């Protein structure tokens, strides 16, 4: 995917960012993969060179299925014990599901679309959910992409006051972008991109954030290994 920004809902959709102590076992049978892990739920402190003692107090599992070369599906669930140092009594159950469709359209052309759902069930706040739909269309040096999101954020996370502290607020965002590669398919791709994002929030939040429509414009430089070269090598090996 080409959007340079992390999704609004990535704390609902991905695994823990950093942990000291992980043990994983898995089984692959044809197009199905089953994995299970035990790990330390608490993220380490700022002194990352002073390794914490692994506690293995949390667990997760995932099942993945690739029914065709173009389609990948997964479902996962995890229990995180006391992941936040500032809220030691908070425990979290995280459940995710995703569908990824990737289609090669021809020589140096590709279409990729991803749908992701994630849910956190926290000790204090209960269940909050996130949804993401993202699609990229690449042809030669040019890529067009879009991302649509909905995420539920609590008054605690938004640091609100009064009765709003216990409420759940749906937040929406839509991004549209374009990237042009100046170098392409020769090992390293260097591209210049721009994207526009617009968001929507409930009227109840106007007194905290104002009643103007939220929007953002971003220009970025991207440097990465050539994807077209990787695709060509993969096709040659078939």
Image (tube, grey):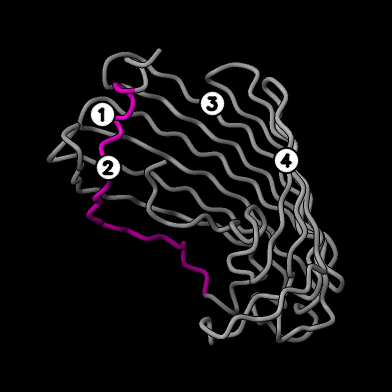
Label 1 vs 4, first from the N-terminus? 4
**Residue 148 percent coordinates (x, y):** 53, 44
Asked which secondary structure carries label 4, the reply is strand
Asked which secondary structure carries label 2, the reply is strand
Tell me the residue that label 3 is attached to.
101
**Residue 222 falls within the magenta-colored stretch:** yes
Asked which secondary structure carries label 1, the reply is helix
Q: Which residues are magenta?
A: 210-233
Tell me the residue that label 1 is attached to.
229
Label 1 vs label 2: CA separation? 9 Å
- The image quadrant that residue 74 belongs to is top right
Which of discs 4 and 2 lies nearer the camera? The answer is: 4
Tell me the residue that label 2 is attached to.
225
- The image quadrant that residue 159 belongs to is bottom right
- Residue at 65% x, 57% y is 15
Relative placement, left or right, of 124 versus 201 is right
The number of numbered discs placed on residues in the rendered structure image is 4
Label 3 vs 4, first from the N-terminus? 4
- Residue at 51% x, 83% y is 49
**Residue 56 percent coordinates (x, y):** 79, 68
Relative placement, left or right, of 19 versus 26 is left
Tell me the residue that label 4 is attached to.
26
Q: Nearer the viewer, residue 52 or 145?
A: 52
Which of discs 1 and 3 lies nearer the camera? The answer is: 1
Label 4 vs 2, first from the N-terminus? 4
């Amino acid at each position: 995917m080409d959007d340079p920004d992390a999704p609004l809902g990535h704390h609902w959709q991905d695994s823990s960012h950093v942990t000291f102590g992980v043990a994983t076992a898995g089984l692959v049978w044809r197009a199905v993969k089953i994995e299970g892990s035990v790990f330390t739920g608490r993220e380490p402190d700022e002194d990352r060179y002073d390794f914490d003692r692994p506690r293995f107090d949390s667990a997760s599992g995932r099942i993945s299925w690739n029914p065709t070369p173009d389609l990948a599906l997964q479902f996962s669930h995890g229990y995180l014990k006391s992941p936040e140092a500032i809220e030691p009594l908070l425990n979290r159950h995280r459940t995710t599901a995703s569908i990824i469709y990737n289609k090669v359209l021809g020589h140096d052309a590709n279409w990729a679309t991803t749908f992701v759902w994630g849910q956190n069930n926290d000790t204090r706040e209960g269940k909050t959910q996130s949804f993401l739909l993202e699609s990229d269309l690449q042809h030669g040096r040019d890529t067009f992409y879009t991302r649509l999101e909905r995420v539920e954020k609590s008054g605690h996370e938004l640091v609100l006051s009064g009765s709003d502290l216990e409420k759940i607020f749906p937040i929406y965002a839509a991004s549209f972008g374009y990237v042009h590669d100046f170098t392409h398919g020769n090992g390293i791709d260097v591209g210049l991109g721009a994207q526009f994002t617009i968001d929507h929030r409930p009227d109840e939040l106007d007194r905290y954030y104002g009643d103007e429509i939220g929007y953002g414009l971003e220009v970025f430089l991207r440097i990465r290994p050539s994807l077209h070269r990787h695709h060509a090598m993969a096709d040659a090996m078939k």
